Amino acid sequence: MAERGTSRRPDHLSAVPDAGPEKAPEKGSEPADLLRAVARGDEKAFARLYDLVAPRVYGLIRRVLRDPAQSEEVAQEVLVEVWRTAARFDPARGSATSWICTIAHRRAVDRVRAEQSAAERLAFVGRAQVDIPYDSVADEVSGRLERQQVRRCLSDLTELQRQAVTLAYYQGHTYPQVAELLGAPLPTVKTRMRDGLIRLRDCLGAGVPA
Amino acid sequence: MIHGLIGPYVLDAVDDIERATFERHLRECDVCRADVDELREASARLADGAWSVPPPALRDNVLSAITSVRQIAPISPAPVRTARPRRRLRVVAAAAAVVVAVAGAATVASVIQNDRVRRAHDRAEAAQAAEARVRAVLAAPDLVVREEPVTGGGRVTVASSKLHDAGVIMLAAGSAPAGGKVYQLWTIRSRQPVNEGALAPGQTTSVQIVDGVSQASDVGVSIEPPGGSTTPTTPLAADVKL
């Protein structure tokens, strides 16, 4: 808990239901501390970091890619990348969670775009017709506590802000694609994305779980 | 106005050319870098909204993969910096101050992408399937989730949204009913049971979307002969009050 004394903004991951038996975060168990230990080659710290961040990393990638097998593959790449480049994490620039999610999101988006341009996305239609696997839906619900705050804050955005932000973030669309999908001018979409993020930041910042 | 790309950049909604251009801009602009860092904290929280338990094999695979991956060395010992105070974005001022021409190539790239997205969009429209509906309901801002145990093991979860006037019933029973019988799902509307579908013999899990949940008071599960019944013939094995 030593880290809590500083004015560093709290790490959002501390709100995750802990995979381990201990409930209260002990010293050195925060993602930023773990990441620093990982940078020194500490494999045990990496395993604990994995337990904290994997549901977010995997969930985010899966939301963007949809295909479970591909998501698993990309999640593995991302988590190995976290191990490899842990030394690059700079706590002065943001939380460990945010650093890791940034890597995950970019990888997922890169993969979606590569797919879009490589094939005609034959699987696109097929995927939507597949029976709904129970597990994937149950997963959706299991993380609902984590989601509640984000969902509440998203609902505070204007319709256009929310659409612009979520189409880009959860579906990996570029802003010209978002403009096309929403039938809105490019400059408007750019502005809505920025304003949406600012509002989201203000809303989330007000109620960051301790 | 390259700075106008801050929102798309943070959301990874730019193409490679724009990304490179924007990052070049960031290297010369401390204020912009701080703005990006702040918005990144917000955008990363969107990952909360996608939280999903990974397959157990992923953990083993990752932990065994890292043993053969060499880490990059730290550039320098991590400097102890005082956290900067929280402050408002100075986007407008920065945007007014910085004017950078974007390469014409970016426009060409957008045109190609627009064409692609149109085709994807057409296909997506043609494929409005149950999964999309389920996910739409689950993503509703007013989603309410209720759960009850099923007699004989397992549970039934009902996630409903007034906005969508729809709900998703998720049944995960511990085991299939004995004697070749099946689980059947019901809603109770004006005290009358309405059939919401029977499972196949041996089937223990199901995801079912139901419309008009605002008129339903309960979601029930009963055990019925194969093919289901028109009204429950056994006491409900689970009853979720809405």
Image (cartoon, helix red, strand yellow):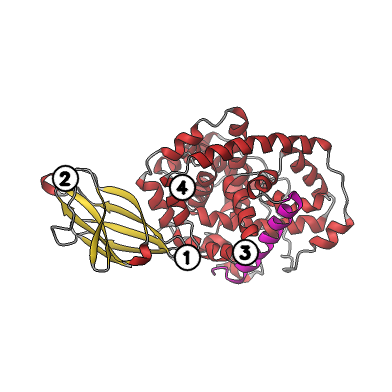
Quadrant position of residue A31: bottom right
Q: CA distance from mark 1 to mark 2?
A: 36 Å
Can marks 1 and 2 be said to lie on one chain?
yes
Q: Which mark is residue A157?
A: 3
Residue A69 pos. (x, y %): 46, 36
Looking at this view, is B145 or B16 the one in front? B145
| Picture residue at 61% right of the left edge, 58% below the top | A162
Type of amino acid under label 2: Pro
The secondary element bearing badge 1 is classed as loop
Magenta span:
A185-210
Type of amino acid under label 1: Asp
- In this view, B139 is above or below B87: above
Q: Which residue is the site of mark 2?
A: B226
Q: Which residue is the site of mark 4?
A: B132
The secondary element bearing badge 3 is classed as loop
Dot 1: within a 10 Å radius of its alpha carbon, few (fewer than 14), some, or many (20 or more) residues?
some
| Picture residue at 61% right of the left edge, 52% below the top | A36
Q: Earlier in the sequence, mark 1 or mark 4?
A: 4
Magenta stretch containing residue A30, yes or no? no
Can marks 2 and 3 be said to lie on one chain?
no
Residue B167 pos. (x, y %): 38, 58
Which mark's residue is nearer the viewer, 2 or 3? 2
Quadrant position of residue B94: bottom right
